[in-house]
């Protein structure tokens, strides 16, 4: 394992030893033996050269974009061509030229794989997919303009559906997959038709004879089979596992014998499909994004490569430091022999997935038990070590505690009284996916593909929370689950939109939240104190106490541990985190002094862990449980964001939403059978949590240039530098 990791780090190809890939979800993957080699961040797709000797890979992650050319026989890198931007899957126009969707270059780029020369051909805003006709004509789609474009001396365009993602060229017509909808656009010589398919089609592939169009519907876990003569969906191939929804089919390749291969991003596998059925699955790597096939081999690009890792040497003063969680998330390309699929895997199992934990004979984590109310608090962007590294118990590194006990006395006291969870991992790397994982136990393929270029500063559209359609998972959110099963819910600030007019009420575009939000509770607005958020929550809570009708599930967003950097006139980072700490303590104080304390569990977790170092793993995060039934002490059990979601579901009698909360271990051991009803008394801030940044503070000018309107809209790499500096954790 260590030897293999070293080979990959050095970029040495051809490693074929048995390997085990460990993920923060606690899934372990053992792909079939074969060559594997690293790429840059987030490879989005790959293509075989006409003679089968080379592979072109598009890298479009947080780090600078590039086109990587690999040799198929051992996957060693032949050339890496830096690009201004790229996205999606490349194609070869001949033996030496690769055509690449240019994303924010608003162009199609033609790369000479032998020399590295790049030609740019303007097309439209954010080119995300391309195809090539038999006559050599290039066709493209614009993700932001919802347009199909024919390249040539004169550009011609046809409107498509929302977020076009892929093109298939059928005899005499074109199909476009509309990722933001459940449709295809069929472009014929004399008309344009809309074809209904399953939710969020992400990839297309034609059968060898052109009679069938395969449609990877990423949020339905299906591959729809379309008759190209009638446009009728004649079959739907279920590629999800029986344990639950969440496969994310996101790329397709058809072998010359008609065998279909599908990349299952969220299941970390490739499915082999024959005669309309999944015959076998092979573990591929962490989040596969692309697949190509020749006579003997399946090639797969893995968006996150071979593992996560610890980042205790994170040096945020280097804005492109490889220890930053999103920069460290490098990908890989793997070769899998086609004849190993049936020998190493089965149709309905991926070896190494967690086995569901058996329900203990006695537990309070059950519907109808003593805990009838849940308050779920979502915070913003901290690792375990960054806050709790200085706890006297648990596996922490005090040298990495940027916001230790003097700044977060309540975080520390809550952990010491109710339980220390030093093996809790965020399912997300960043906030774009974090708020979806926290409320849906999932992030779909649109999210996973588009957040890396967004965080790399190349795609400005942040359409990952309230009002977004392409990023909404087909499995729904906690509020949908609650509504469907008659569980009362109240939301304070999660997935809400700012009022149209100053002083107005906050709104939501999420159908399951309409009528269930407190219109006075803000979302991610760092100009509003977390103390103000708790004031508003407390106002309604006290009314619920008087009326005896506390909702079963309350979701409360407390985002201010994100901080405002050193923006002049804003609170200092330490004051922001101290304010957030006191706000959390206040919630527990208020509930524990009320009639509802005996029947309540309070869960608080960061949406992600991207903004700090951790000596165990860069996705280890802080988690707090407060309840009369909480079992104190150190809990070394492996938990994830989805574990928290699953525990909430079990307490409220809700079914799991996805394969991730289905398989995540619930927090059974975190609860005792008998209650301790002593209230919790909030601890006053130990530092001045009203002190503000001066114009001369380190990073003040940079902070003034940042966008703090959305979670992580400010460049996290620059913000992390500022936070580390003011916390005194930069190298001397």
Image (cartoon, grey):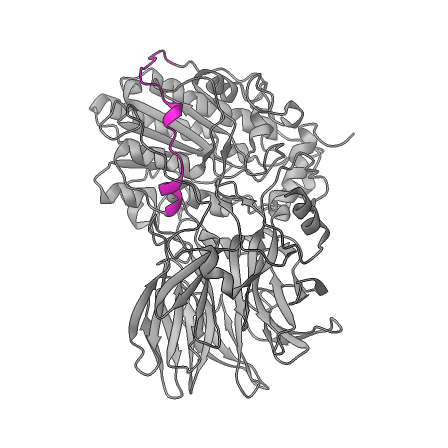
Q: Position of residue 284 (x, y in %)?
A: 52, 55
Q: Residue at x 30, y 81 (%)?
A: 230
Please provide the residue range marked out in magenta. Answer: 659-679
Q: Is residue 166 above or below residue 599?
A: below
x and y, in percent, of residue 645 in the image: 37, 37
Q: Is residue 480 magenta?
A: no
- Residue 363: quadrant of the picture: top left
Q: Residue at x 71, y 54 (%)?
A: 11
For residue 505, what is the image quadrant? top left
Looking at the image, is 135 positioned above or below residue 419? Answer: below
Tell me the quadrant of the picture where the N terminus can be found: top right
- Is residue 465 rendered to the left or right of residue 40? left
Q: In the image as oriented, which residue stretches furthest toward the top?
A: 678
Relative vertical location of residue 518 with respect to residue 252 in this rendering, above or below: above
Q: How many marks?
A: 0
Give whichever of 352, 133 is nearer the camera: 352
Q: Position of residue 273 (x, y in %)?
A: 40, 66
Task: Name the residue furthest right.
Answer: 732
In this view, the residue in front, 692 or 97, is 97
Split into 4 quadrants, where in the image is the C terminus? Answer: top right
User: Is residue 670 covered in magenta?
Assistant: yes
- In the shown orientation, is residue 447 left or right of residue 219? right
- Could one spot residue 496 in this view of the protein? no
Whether residue 99 is visible, yes or no, is yes
């Amino acid at each position: 394992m260590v030897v293999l990791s070293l080979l990959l780090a050095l970029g040495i190809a051809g490693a074929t030893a048995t390997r085990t890939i460990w993920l923060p979800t606690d899934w372990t993957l053992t792909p079939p033996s074969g060559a594997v080699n690293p790429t840059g961040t987030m490879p989005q797709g790959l293509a075989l050269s006409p003679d089968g000797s080379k592979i072109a890979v598009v890298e479009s992650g947080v780090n600078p974009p590039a086109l990587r050319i690999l040799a198929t026989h051992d996957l060693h890198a032949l050339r890496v061509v830096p690009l201004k931007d790229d996205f999606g899957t490349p194609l070869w126009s001949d033996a030496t030229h690769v055509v690449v969707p240019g994303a924010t270059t608003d162009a199609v780029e033609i790369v000479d794989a032998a020399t590295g020369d790049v030609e740019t051909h303007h097309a439209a805003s954010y080119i995300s997919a391309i195809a090539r006709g038999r006559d050599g004509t290039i066709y493209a789609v614009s993700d932001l303009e919802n347009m199909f474009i024919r390249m040539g001396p004169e550009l011609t365009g046809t409107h498509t559906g929302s977020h076009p993602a892929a093109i298939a060229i059928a005899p005499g017509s074109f199909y476009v997959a509309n990722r933001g909808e459940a449709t295809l656009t069929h472009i014929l010589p004399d008309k344009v038709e809309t074809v209904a398919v399953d939710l969020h089609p992400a990839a297309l592939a034609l059968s060898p004879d052109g009679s069938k169009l395969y449609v990877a519907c990423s949020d339905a876990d299906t591959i729809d089979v379309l008759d190209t003569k009638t446009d009728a969906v004649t079959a739907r191939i279920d590629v999800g596992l029986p344990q639950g929804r969440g496969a994310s089919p996101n790329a397709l390749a058809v072998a010359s014998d008609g065998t279909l291969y599908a990349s299952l991003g969220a299941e970390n596998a490739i499915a082999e499909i024959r005669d309309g059925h999944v015959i076998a699955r092979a573990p591929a790597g962490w989040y596969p994004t692309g697949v190509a096939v020749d006579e003997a081999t399946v090639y797969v690009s893995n968006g996150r490569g071979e593992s996560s890792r610890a980042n205790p040497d994170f040096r945020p003063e280097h804005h492109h430091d490889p220890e930053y969680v999103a920069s460290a998330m490098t990908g890989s390309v793997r070769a899998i022999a086609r004849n190993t699929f049936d020998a190493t895997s089965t149709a309905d199992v991926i070896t190494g997935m967690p086995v569901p934990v058996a329900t203990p004979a006695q537990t309070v984590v059950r519907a109808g038990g003593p805990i009838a109310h849940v308050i779920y608090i979502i915070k913003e962007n901290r690792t375990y070590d960054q806050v709790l590294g200085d706890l006297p118990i648990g596996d922490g590194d005090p040298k990495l505690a940027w916001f230790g006990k003097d700044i977060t006395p309540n975080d520390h006291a809550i952990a010491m009284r109710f339980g220390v969870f030093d093996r809790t991992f965020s399912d997300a790397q960043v906030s774009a996916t974090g708020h979806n994982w926290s409320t849906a136990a999932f992030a779909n393929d649109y999210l996973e593909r588009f957040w890396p270029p967004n965080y790399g500063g190349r795609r400005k559209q942040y359409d990952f929370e309230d009002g977004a359609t392409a990023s909404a998972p087909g499995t729904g959110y906690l509020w949908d689950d609650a509504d469907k099963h008659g569980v009362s819910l109240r939301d304070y600030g999660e997935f809400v939109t700012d009022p149209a007019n100053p002083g107005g009420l906050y709104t939501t575009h999420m159908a399951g939240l309409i009528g269930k939000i407190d219109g006075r509770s803000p979302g991610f607005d760092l100009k509003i104190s977390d103390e103000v958020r708790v004031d508003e929550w407390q106002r309604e809570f006290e009314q619920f106490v008087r009326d005896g009708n506390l909702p079963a599930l309350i979701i409360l967003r407390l985002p201010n541990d994100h901080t405002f950097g050193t923006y002049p006139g804003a609170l200092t980072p330490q004051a922001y985190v101290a304010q957030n700490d006191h706000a959390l303590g206040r919630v527990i104080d208020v509930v524990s002094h009320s009639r509802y304390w005996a029947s309540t569990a309070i869960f608080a977790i960061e949406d992600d862990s991207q903004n700090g170092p951790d000596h165990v793993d860069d996705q280890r995060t802080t988690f707090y449980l407060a309840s009369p039934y909480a079992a104190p002490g150190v809990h070394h059990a492996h938990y994830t964001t989805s574990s928290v979601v699953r525990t909430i579901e079990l307490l409220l009698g809700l079914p799991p939403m996805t394969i991730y909360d289905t398989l995540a271990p619930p927090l059974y051991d975190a609860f005792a059978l008998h209650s301790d009803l002593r209230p919790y008394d909030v601890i006053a801030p130990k530092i001045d949590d009203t002190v503000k940044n001066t114009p001369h503070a380190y990073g003040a000018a940079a902070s003034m240039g940042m966008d703090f309107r959305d979670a992580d809209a400010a460049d996290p790499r620059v913000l992390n530098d500022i936070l580390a500096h003011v916390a005194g954790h930069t190298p001397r």
